[in-house]
């Protein structure tokens, strides 16, 4: 089947670039249940509920997947947007997603809120420095994550824009 013949399930999603004081981004390790050999790293976040705003979905997903609870307004504006097409568990999706930048001094990740699919397909998490991730040879999504982080984060050594509760909600220009 060619890409032109493939039926895509449309999906809206919101994702979070959760970055700690050492400028490391939180990523989850996972795999596609239909292709267990297809392993990759990805940001917290996921599909939006019907009628849910991107900020509300990102805040909900962040709480479910990491235990970090923020009001949607604390996320600020998205720092990046993209549309991706990908298979997961035998279904092809065309996903429009927005990314929010959240800065924390430190965060102890709590995955107790994972749903059944996440419990079955997420194998761990790690805080990654962008340069180490880019040099790692690991598969990660979005595929240009180090460049997205470079645009979204203030210059090295510069102050982070602090939002409510010490969480930065400002970032670079979105695509």
Image: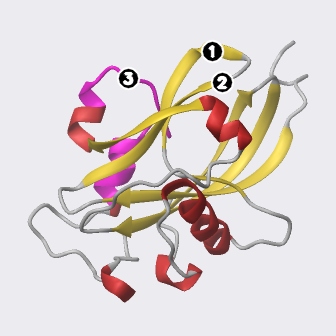
Classify mark 3: residues with Cα within 10 Å, few (<14), some (14-19) or many (20+).
few
Residue 99 horizontal/vertical position (percent): 52, 60
- Residue name at image x 44 percent, y 25 percent: 139
Front residue of 23/151: it is 23
Of the two numbered discs 3 and 1 in the rendering, the one whose residue sits closer to the viewer: 1
Horizontal side of residue 126 vs 9, given as left or right: left
Residue drawn at the location 54% of the way across and 62% of the way down: 62
Q: Residue 74: which disc?
A: none
What is the quadrant of residue 101 in the picture?
bottom left
Find the residue positioned furthest to the bottom: 164
Reading the image, the residue beneath label 3 is 138
- Earlier-in-chain disc, 3 versus 1: 1
Residue under circle 1?
A: 36
Residue 40 is situated, as x and y percent measured from the top left of the image, at 50, 27
Q: Which residue is mark 2?
A: 32
Q: Is disc 1 in contact with disc 2, using a CB cutoff of under 8 Å?
A: yes
The residue segment tinted magenta is 134-151
Cα distance between the residues tagged 1 and 2: 5 Å
Q: Position of residue 103 (x, y in %)?
A: 33, 68
Between 78 and 114, the residue placed more toward the observer is 114
Judged left or right of residue 24, residue 47 is: right
- Which residue is farthest front? 112
Query: Up-down: is 64 above or below 134?
Result: below
Quadrant position of residue 106: bottom left
Tag 2, which secondary structure?
A: strand
Residue 68, image x, y percentages: 47, 67
Identify which residue, 37 or 94, lies in the foreground: 37
- Mark 3 or mark 2, which is nearer the start of the sequence? 2
- Structural crowding at the residue carrying mark 2, measured as other residues with C-alpha within 10 Å and reported as few (<14), some (14–19) or many (≥20): some
């Amino acid at each position: 089947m060619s890409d032109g013949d493939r039926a895509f399930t449309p999906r809206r999603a919101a994702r979070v670039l959760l970055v700690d004081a050492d400028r490391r981004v939180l990523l989850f390790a996972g795999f596609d249940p239909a292709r267990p050999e297809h392993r990759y790293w990805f940001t917290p976040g996921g599909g939006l509920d019907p009628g849910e705003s991107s900020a509300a979905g990102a805040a909900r997903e962040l709480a479910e997947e990491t235990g970090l609870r923020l009001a949607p307004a604390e996320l600020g504006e998205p720092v990046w947007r993209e549309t991706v097409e990908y298979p997961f568990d035998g279904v092809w999706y065309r996903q429009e997603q927005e990314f929010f930048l959240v800065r924390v001094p430190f965060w102890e990740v709590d995955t107790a809120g994972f749903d059944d699919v996440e419990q079955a397909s997420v194998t761990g998490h790690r805080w990654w420095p962008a340069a180490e991730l880019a040099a790692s040879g690991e598969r990660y999504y979005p595929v240009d994550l180090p460049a997205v982080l470079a645009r979204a984060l203030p210059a090295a050594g510069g102050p982070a824009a602090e939002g409510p509760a010490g969480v930065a909600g400002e970032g670079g220009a979105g695509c």
